[in-house]
Image (cartoon, rainbow, N blue to C red):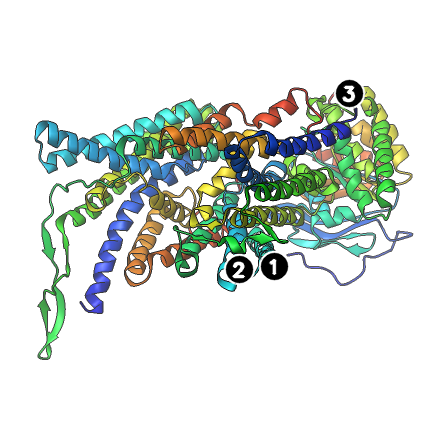
Amino acid sequence: MTAWMKAWLLHLGVLALLVLAWFALPAYHTGNLARILVLAVYAQGFNLVFGYTGLLSLGHALFFAAGLYGLGLSIQHFGLPALPAIGVALGFAALVAAVTGYLALRTKGVAFMIVTLMFAQTGYLVVLYAGTWTRGDEGFVIARAARSLFGLDLADDRIRYFAALTLFAIVFLSLAAVVSSGFGRALVAIRENEERARLLGYDVQRIKWLAVIVSGVVSGAAGAAYALLFGYAGATFASVQYSILPLLWVLLGGPGTTIGPLIGTVFMFYLVDFASEITDAYLLLVGVALILLTLFLPRGIAGELRRRGLTWLP
Amino acid sequence: MEFGPHLVLALLEGSITAAVLALTAAGLALVFGILRVVNVAHGEFFMLGAVLAWFVSTTLADAFGASAAIGFVAALVLAPLVTAAVAMAADRVVLRRIGYDPERTIVATIGLLYVLQQATLMSFGPDARPVEPPFNTRIALPWPERVDGSWAMSWPWGFGTTSYKLFVIGAAVVVLVGLWLLLRHTTLGLIMRATEQDRDMARAFGIPVTRVYALVFGLGAALAALGAVLVVPIQQAHYLMGGDPLLLSFIVVIIGGLGSVGGTVVAAVLIGLTDGVVSVFFSATLAKIIATLLVAMVLVFRPQGLFGKNTAR
Amino acid sequence: MATVSPIEPEADEMAATPVLQTRGLSKSFGGVDAVLDVDLAVREHEVRALIGPNGAGKSTFTGLVVGRFEPTRGGVWFDGRDISTLPAHERIRLGIAYTFQITSVFAELSVHENVALAVRRAVASLNLGRRGRHRAIRQRVADALMRVGLDTRSDAIAGDLAYGHQRLLEIAMGLAQAPRLFIMDEPTQGLALDEIERFIALIKQLSTTTTILLIEHNMPVVMRCADRISVLESGRLLAEGTPDEIQADAAVQAAYLGRDLPESDP
């Protein structure tokens, strides 16, 4: 079996498992999974920029929030139905990514991390400042009536689960195609040796910028989906915490792999779920996890698997 | 109160912010200058200083009936020392192992941030707790006014400060001067500056670089903790109080020029005063938005900050 | 900012437009003149060697040509076209290949992928369709690796190769681009004697289709490969001529500390 065939089987297998999960797992877990799948889309968006291009953005919450509030505010304050609201959310996320990405990419390394962090902080503060519309930290609920797409009630457990799974599947397979394309390989080249890539004729600045825009749109799609499927938008989703979480998920699962983000999100979600039953300070686990990962498992789970033999893992 | 006195009051409050900020940011600048790493948990060292100050002064008061003054002095000594110890432990266990790699350090210190913050939440609790200042006499301030065609001094009601607030500013100045003397006029300072200039060269000269790093990391944390101990009688200790100082320190260090302690102090004064004035007359959130965007733009268009050297590292 | 001469490069002793031409090319780093007023012209299919003592400015010069640095003064023309203000990646796309003085490959990627990256970008501009493109990539990668003798190591990780083989890999990456001008910075450094022999044969074969500019310290290689030699010293062009002319040139000998032109390091 060629590497290509194994990769295809893996991806389809994962999706098949997720379909089966709906029938096999109790309601509590499928409810969780719906949430995990949407967050995994966010993680995949982040992975494109961090795992494949090697850019450590500390401000991806800006894109997630752009999608979340782009959709939420469109429905809540402009009365748009779901489909055009999704369009607004994606367009807004793309715009934000294009502008902030263009500016941030003028810097490198540590400066890049700080600039992205600052842009995201600005976004968070703007959400607070515009409290009359966004209701700040408290957030607002999106009415069930508004959360319907193609006549389907997205608040219904089964519809919600399969809507989340559909979005996940689309992003999962599309990104797998992107990373094995010329563009995807150029991202890896830039991560591995930017100067060499440049002196092979690659327009490094433009390629990075495109990666940030695609990443921003995917992250924004996750944000919009979250608002639409779970009916709530709040400032926490624009805070630093939501920029750190995808980093954690991707690091754990394996940066630069296609299944890494899903693995990391599932794992951390249940770890935090488990910890928050014991203590209010469940974020402590996030902290410890980050430290342990940086020390001992910098390639993440899928990354280590790939290194130790599963070389065909995309 | 009229505009004049109001402005002066805002400037005074801003000076206190500037004083504490200068100490905290100096710690961050020192670590970045010498270790070349960004410590995202720096705000948590600040918080730790405040929490420890509460702990020390409360324990001394409850167990030994010590006065607020003695409690405060003890806190002033113990809190920075303990915080420095925590920092040096983190350096040994984590930072040294990852070789001070810039990217991995940022991730690791984010982890450290959560660990310190949440551990404090578990032990100290979610409430804000006050600490008694060692002394706190009100000082009314005079303001010149025109009375019947000639100038006279009046004491507008509400226009004043406290002796403790003035002490904070004075103490910060003393410590910063001490830091400057340490860096410029002692052997230790020379060793630190040499390590900052060229790590490999310093090693070749027999300087124990790993030990210098540990010491500097501890010193940076101690400075932040010290700033917190000074401000906690005014502000109260709370497990989330590290966030704002972190952001402001970042702004100061970047605008002042990453790695330049002198530039940091100047920037701290600028930003502290501005923050004080803007917060009084405008919304605090708007002030933060402007400040945050300013940092980003400075980094994008003038990466060496306002005072730093343009070293592409 | 480079001041660009509005006059077309002269075609005095050249039969056709030189592939590479520089006029008054200069670069100072904060008061130090690394390269000063270098006029150079390389004809099509010529093998030009650029030699000189350490610190003469050879790497800075090629860096200026390929666009890694901006010149303080002067300009660069490629096939008669002024490329002085073009960014590096655009110059490469016009048909220049470049190898670094200190080997720069994608260490964590396979040998095959290293060359494929070079090919992929080069064939992207040709309208080949998907299948045609994949075929072209496979063919060119195999061909390039064979020419440098690395075809058996296609699946190896680049960073695991011996240093000399990594240099050969970098050359393969340049070959795969089918460049009009191939700039190599000390390509034989770190190569074993038999590899150097194969390299010389490669250069001779390559010069029938490509123009080559080599920085070299290995004098036997220079003498055997080069059609013409340019000598740099302290940033200035000291002398230029055929290998025999250069060997006999007193100023060049003086530049190399009054000895015969140095032997290569084994």
Q: Write down the chain letter for disc 3.
A: C
Q: Determine the image quadrant of residue C244.
A: top right
Which of the labelled discs sits on residue A74, or is there none? 2
Contact between marks 3 and 1 (CB within 8 A): the answer is: no
Pointer 1 residue: A84
Which kind of residue does numbered mark 3 sit on? Answer: Ala
Quadrant of the image for the C terminus of chain A?
top right
Which of the labelled discs sits on residue C192, or is there none? 3
Secondary structure of residue under mark 2: helix
Left or right placement of residue C112 versus residue C104 in this view:
right
Q: Determine the image quadrant of residue A129.
A: bottom left
Q: Write down the chain letter for disc 1.
A: A
Secondary structure of residue under mark 1: helix
Q: Residues at marks 1 and 2, common chain?
A: yes
Q: Nearer the viewer, mark 2 or mark 3?
A: 2
Contact between marks 2 and 3 (CB within 8 A): the answer is: no
**Image point (11%, 27%), residue name:** B63
Secondary structure of residue under mark 3: loop
**Image point (36%, 24%), residue name:** B89
Q: Write down the chain letter for disc 2.
A: A
Left or right placement of residue C265 versus residue B206 in this view:
right
**N-term mark: 1 or 2:** 2
Rounded to the nearest angstrom, the CA distance separating label 1 from label 2 is: 9 Å
